[in-house]
Image (cartoon, rainbow, N blue to C red):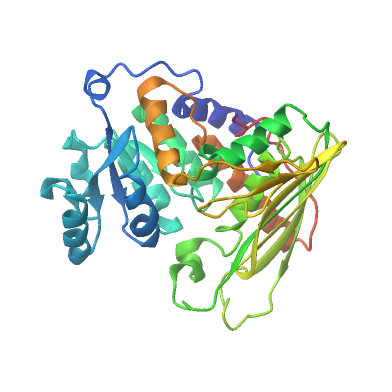
Amino acid sequence: MITRRGFNKNMLLAIASSGFGAIACTDKNLKSKQKLGVALVGLGSYSQYQLGPALLETEFCQLKGIVTGTPEKAKIWSKKYNIDQKNIYSYQNFNAIKENKEIDIVYVVLPNSMHAEYSIRAAEAGKHVICEKPMALNVAECDEIIDTCARAGVKLSVGYRLHSEPYTQEVKRIVAEKHYGDLRYVAADAGYFSDTHPNQWRLNKKLSGGGALMNMGVYSIQSCIYGSGQNPISVMAQEFSTRAEYFKETDETITAQFEFSNGAVGNMMTSHNISANRMYSNFENGWVELSPANSYGPLEGNTSDGRKIKFEHRSQQALQMDDFAKHILFASQNVAPGEMGKRDMIIVESIYKSIAEGGAKQKLELGMMGIVG
């Protein structure tokens, strides 16, 4: 756990980079652009099937560059998205992106172990940064990213797409307005069954930093927080393994219990061995549920008074990237700032510590850190 003094110092730096109270962009080059240029760092499945197609739908940003270590991928992407050769980089010449005026935002979509390095390099190149979740391997790396972005004067966001989509926003509204009274209980489950790719990087602890908790568990943590409208004050956790021959290095299934300052309690489960996709908030006079709650959509919601939560489906990734572009251009709210990613990593570290100590309760001194919207 970090000290209160260090926490407060880093909070000030985080707020500076997140854009709370931000002044509208005064850069003439940015203000004259109809769309901000985005470069994707890493062309794996998430970039291929989600981010690339989403950038064809965005209103305030567009795909202008790529960073890849595979020449064949560079050719395919260049042809498919009409990317200029001068906007294609390798990991070796990535720093040259600093001189490229067509690229305003760098989206880091690499294995977790590379998030800090490339977020920091992008910030030092003067580019605004979206770092895919989880933000880093640990809290210390989160601090490095936040501090570097603050010093460089660039904006920072974590790839929390759900804060930009309407189902999650509706749950946050119901909670904030106390439509059903005070919260009593919140629960969130996020997981999938993994058995087809035993050599994937998510099962390599050096690359992933952990298993289900560092992947799907972030959704469970987030759901418990926006489903309660507050940060937890303590956590206890347990780990379960039934397929040790497959999950040799990383956690398979984790459960955790939260306490909140108003007396409410929460429960989360995350797994790479169980398919799960739900969040549920119970209040004095009713409840709200999303099921599915964290997939790419469309999602689905219900309430205790029989109301169906239903919205027209749009790409969550397009909404997310447009939200960040608007934050840069018009000083709108940064819905997923760096300190939110750091907060979640504090919780992740506390969960792992609780497991290591046989399920012992861990205090969480988070205050209002990362509560946005």
Of residue 300 and residue 68, the one placed in the foreground of this image is 300
Q: Evaluate whether residue 230 shows in this view.
A: yes
Looking at the picture, how far across and down is residue 10, in whole percent?
54, 31
Q: Residue furthest bottom?
A: 245
Horizontally, is 267 left or right of 20 in the view? Answer: right
Q: How many marks?
A: 0
Looking at the picture, how far across and down is residue 29, in whole percent?
21, 23
Q: Evaluate whether residue 160 shows in this view.
A: no
Looking at the picture, how far across and down is residue 333, in whole percent?
49, 25
Does 242 sit above or below residue 181? below
Of residue 124 and residue 67, the one placed in the foreground of this image is 67
Looking at the picture, how far across and down is residue 305, in whole percent?
80, 40
User: The C terminus lies in which quarter of the figure?
Assistant: top right
Quarter of the image where one finds residue 39 = top left
User: The N terminus lies in which quarter of the figure?
Assistant: top right
Residue at figure coordinates x 55%, y 58% from the top left: 215
Of residue 18 and residue 93, the one placed in the foreground of this image is 18
Horizontally, is 44 left or right of 372 in the view? Answer: left
Residue at figure coordinates x 63%, y 49% from the top left: 300
Residue at figure coordinates x 50%, y 53% from the top left: 296
Horizontally, is 43 left or right of 2 in the view? Answer: left
